[in-house]
Amino acid sequence: MLMLSLLLGVLPVALAEDGYELWLRYRPLPAAQADALRQQSRQLVVADASTTGQHTRDELLRALQAMTGSAPALASRASQAGALLVGTPATLPQLRALQPQLGGLGEEGYLIRRQPIDGRAATVIAANSDIGALYGAFHLLRLLQTGQALPADGIREAPRVKLRMLDHWDNLDGYVERGYAGASIWDWHKLPDYVDPRISDYARANASIGINGSVLNNVNSNAVSLTAPYLAKAAALADVLRPWGIRVYLSARFSAPVEIGGLSTADPLDAGVQRWWRDKADEIYRLIPDFGGFLVKANSEGQPGPQDYGRSHADGANLLADALQPHAGVVMWRAFVYSHEQPDDRARQAYDEFVPLDGRFRDNVLLQVKNGAIDFQPREPFHPLFGAMPKTPLMMEFQITKEYLGFATHLVYLGPLYQETLQSDTLAHGPGSTVASIVEGRLDNHALSGIAGVANIGADRNWTGSQFDQANWYVFGRMAWNPRLDAADIARDWVRMTFTPDPAFVAPVVQMMMGSREAAVDYMTPLGLHHLMGRGHHYGPAPWVEGGSRADWTSVYYHRADADGIGFDRSASGSNAVAQYAPPLAAEFADPRRVPEQYLLWFHHVRWDRPMASGRTLWDELVHHYSRGVEYVRDMRRTWAGLDGHIDAERQQQVAAFLAIQEKEAQWWRDASIAYFQTFSGLPLAAGEAAPAHPLQYYQQLSFPYAPGDGK
Ligand code: GCW
C-alpha cells in the first residue's frame, strides 16, 4: 500500500477521516497531473471585489495548493503564461473579449476554456456574475479531482432549473423531522449574534453542487419563525449563505396572522389578513433583501390552510404570492394533500384537488409535487400531476433523507430513483414529455422552475449520518442543476472525490451503489408494494399495521392481502387512479399483462398463483425478490470488505459496520414480510428459500419507542 502510494506520488491514505470534508477533500494529485496543473496555474487572477469573489479565490488557492503542493501566485492581471483567470468581463478587463460568448448563460452559467490572454496560454473561467464564476471554479476543481481533462472546446454550462432547493424539516428546538444525522445545524438560540462557522461550510458544499436555496424550517411549521426575533436570526444566516449564491426561504404557517398577528381569522380573502401578509413580507425584505419566498404545507396532515375558511388552495397561494410579488419572491405551495375525511384512494387526492385549479395561480407560484402520489416510497410511479397542469410551474420534491429507505444506516444511493422519475415519460404532449422537461419548465414554457430535496443534513460530524448518504445530497444537487445527468456518472465523480480516484476502488463501489436502491425495493417492498413500514416512525417492516385514527396511515390499506391475492386495485374495477395518467399510459398501467412488473401491485390486486415473466408464481416471485434484496446487501458487505486498505480505516470501518446493520435489517424485512404474507397465501416457500428466522408474532411484538426522526 505504502509502495503504491509512493509510486502514485500521493500521501499514504491512512490519515483518519471523519467525512466532514465531504467531496471537497483536495488530496495531492499524482506527480504528473500535479506538474501539469502547476504549469497551468502559475498565476491566479480572480475578481475578488465581492465576498463571492473572495470565496472563489480562497477555494482555488486552497485546492490548488493542496493538490499540487505549491500555491499559485495571486495577481490582479495575467502577465505570464499559465494563468488561471476567473471573473466576469466587467470585473476582469482581460476577459472583456469573451463577452459575446457569455450570451445565453444567464446569471449562473459559465465558460471554462483554454484561451490565450494577451497572446499567452491561459485558462479562463468566465461568467456574467460572480456566482457564475464560483460555479465554474467548482466545476474545474471537480475535473481536477476526478482526473478528467478539460474538453478541447471547453465547457459551457448553465443550470436547467432555476430554483435548486434544500428543504430542511428542522424545528425551532433543533429537532429534525425525518432527520437521521443528529440535531439541526441551525442553532436558533445563539443566532443572530453567533453564526457557527459550520454554516459557511454548509453553504460552500451546496455551492459546489449548484444548490441556490434553503428553506430553513419544517413545513410542519411554527408561526414563531415569522416573528421579529426569528427573522433577525434568519437574516444572520442569510448573510452567510448569500455570498455562496444561496437564498433563504421560510416555511410559512397559514394561520400565522391569528397565532402571532392577533387577528381573528386567517381567511385569504379577508382584507386585514392580506394586509398582515403584505406587512410581514415588507418586514422580511427589510432584513433579507433577497429573501426567496415561502414554502407552504396547507390543509394536509392537520396543518391549517385556506380550506379552513372554505377557500381553495389557489386562494391561499395567491394571498402569499401577492404579498411577495413587489419583492420578486415566490410561493412554493405543496401538493402533498390528502384529507382526513376522504374515503377515496389517497393516491388520487392531490390530482383531484389541484388539476381543476390549473391556471388560477399567480405567476410567482410554483406547485411543489412529490415524486410519487403516496409518499417517498422506495419505488413509486411518477406523480400523475406531472403533465396534468400545463399552466402551472410544477416543482419536483424529492426526499434526500431516507425516511422510507433505511434511515442513515442502509447504503441506498438515490441517484437511480431520481433518474427513474425524471426520465419517466408522461406523454402529456406526446412522446418525450418527460418529467424532467416539465420540471425544467421547458415543456410548457414556464419562466419559473424548481427542484427541492428534503435535506438529510444534521449536526453529525459527517453531516448526513453516514458516509454514503453524502452521495444523496451530492447527486440531488447535480441533478437539480441538470435533471438529464446520469446517476452512474455522478456516482463515479462522487466516489473519486470522496474516497479515492483509484479505479480498483471506484468501479466496484459505483457498481454497488447503482444496484443498492433496487436492493432496498426488493427487501422492503417489491413488485409495487408500498407503505408497509412501522407506524409513525417508519422504521422496519410492519405490514400488519391496521386500525387507528386513519385507514390511509395503515399498511393493510395499501397491500390489501387476502386469501386470493395481494395489491391495490387502482384500475377501473378499483379506485381508477390509473385514469389520472395520459391515456396510453393509463391503458398500459390498467392492464395487468402490460403494466411493468415493478408497478404490478401498485395498480392491481393479483392472485397468488398468477404466473410472472420469470415463470414463477406471484408468491414465489415475491419471496424471490425479498431474498434477492438480502443477497445484494451480503454482496455489498463482501465487496466492501475486499476493498479494505484503499481508504482510511475510520470511514472504512464505519461503512462496514453500517452494512452489517443493513444486512440484519434487510433479513428482518424479508423474514417479517414473508411470515406475514404467508398467513394469506397459505403457500409453502420454494425449494432453497429459507424459512423466516422467527415466528410472525416475534416480529409483531417488536417496538421502537425512540426510533429517530418521528413526526412530533
Ligand atoms: O413523508 C411524510 C412524513 C411527514 C412529513 C410529510 C410531509 C413534514 O412522514 O413527517 O411531514 O410527509 O411531506 O408533509
Image (cartoon, grey):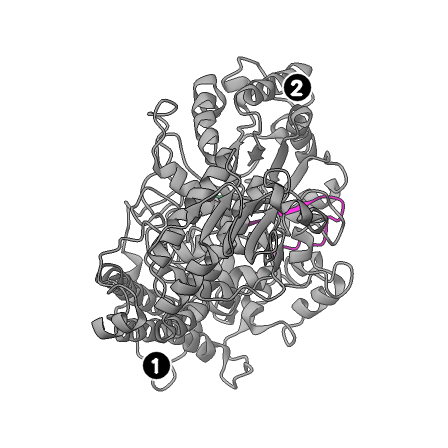
Would you name the residue on which mark 2 appears?
Answer: 274
Residue depicted at 51% across the width and 80% down the height = 609
Question: Which of marks 1 and 2 precedes in the sequence?
Answer: 2
For label 2, the crowd category at 10 Å Cα-Cα, with few meaning under 14, some 14 to 19 and many 20 or more, is some
The dot on residue 689 is: 1
Q: Is residue 209 shown to the viewer in this render?
A: no
Residues in magenta, as a range: 380-398
Q: Residue at x 49, y 51 (%)?
A: 138
The answer as to whether callout 2 falls within 8 Å of ligand 1 is no
Main SS, magenta residues? loop
**Drawn side of residue 379 relative to residue 116, left or right:** left
For the point 47% across and 35% down, the residue is: 241
Instruction: Choose between 552 and 233: the one closer to the eye.
Output: 233
**Identity of the amino acid at label 2?**
Gln
Residue type at mark 1 is Glu
Find numbered disc 1 in the image and state the secondary structure of the residue it sits on.
loop
User: Where is residue 82 shown, x and y percent of the image?
Assistant: 50, 56
